[in-house]
Amino acid sequence: MIIRRLTGADLAGLQEFYDSLTEEITYFFRPWGEATEEILRDHLASGEDGRALVWGLVSEAGEVEGHAFIRGPGTEQPSFGIGLRKRAQDQGWGRRLAEAILAEADARGFPEVHLGVNKDNPRAIALYQSLGWTIIGEIDSNCPDGSWRMVRARP
Ligand SMILES: CC(C)(COP(=O)(O)OP(=O)(O)OC[C@H]1O[C@@H](n2cnc3c(N)ncnc32)[C@H](O)[C@@H]1OP(=O)(O)O)[C@@H](O)C(=O)NCCC(=O)NCCS
């Protein structure tokens, strides 16, 4: 597996990744209402023109197995998201992918990175806390248990 920035050349791979996600995963990870080609093309362009950090976990066969991003660098609340396919989960790849994008955020001097996470997602919450995020409040969400707002300050 390779952890690297995604570019416009990854459009088909990223589309296939989003099309493959199960309901169980999209319950927790749904950065867009629908991951249309237009949305994904703009997202990948935003990684190339500085409006976002856009990283992926890519298999040797070239399939996108995970996606992480930080949207809105330079704004008050740059926001982080991450999701992996089921077959790539629970092997440490989520942690490595998050560490890679945070290393870039820290190198670029982002003072804070924000996120929202469902309260019924203990795995993600534990991962985020171990990477330096803390709970600072709640956010409105469709999750029946509600969602936490978390922030990580640059170490
Ligand atoms: C959340 C997610 C990104 C984590 O990535 P992952 O590769 O599966 O997780 P990792 O193997 O890197 O493990 C991360 C940590 O969670 C811990 N963990 C696993 N299951 C856990 C649980 N039920 N409760 C608490 N911690 C748990 C692991 O022990 C590990 O900690 P360690 O590195 O100290 O051992 C991934 O599972 C995923 O994409 N899930 C579905 C979508 C999602 O929930 N995205 C986040 C939306 S906010």
Image (cartoon, helix red, strand yellow):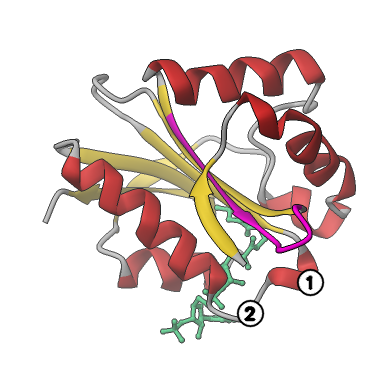
Using the image as rendered, state which of residue 149 and residue 109 is in the foreground: 109
Q: Is residue 51 above or below residue 103?
A: above
Secondary structure predominantly adopted by residues drawn in magenta:
strand
Is residue 25 left or right of 51 when viewed as pictured?
Answer: right
Mark 2 closeness class: few <14, some 14–19, many ≥20 residues within 10 Å = few
Q: CA distance from mark 1 to mark 2?
A: 9 Å
Mark 1 closeness class: few <14, some 14–19, many ≥20 residues within 10 Å = few
Q: Amino acid at mark 2?
A: Asp
> Is residue 119 at least partly visible in the picture?
no
> Is residue 82 at least partly visible in the picture?
yes
Q: Position of residue 42 (x, y in %)?
A: 62, 15
Instruction: Judge: label 2 CB < 8 Å from ligand 1.
Output: yes
Which residues lie in the magenta part? 53-62
The residue that label 1 is drawn on is 87
Badge number at residue 51: none
Residue drawn at (67%, 29%) of the image = 9
Q: Is residue 116 above or below residue 89?
A: above
Badge number at residue 90: 2
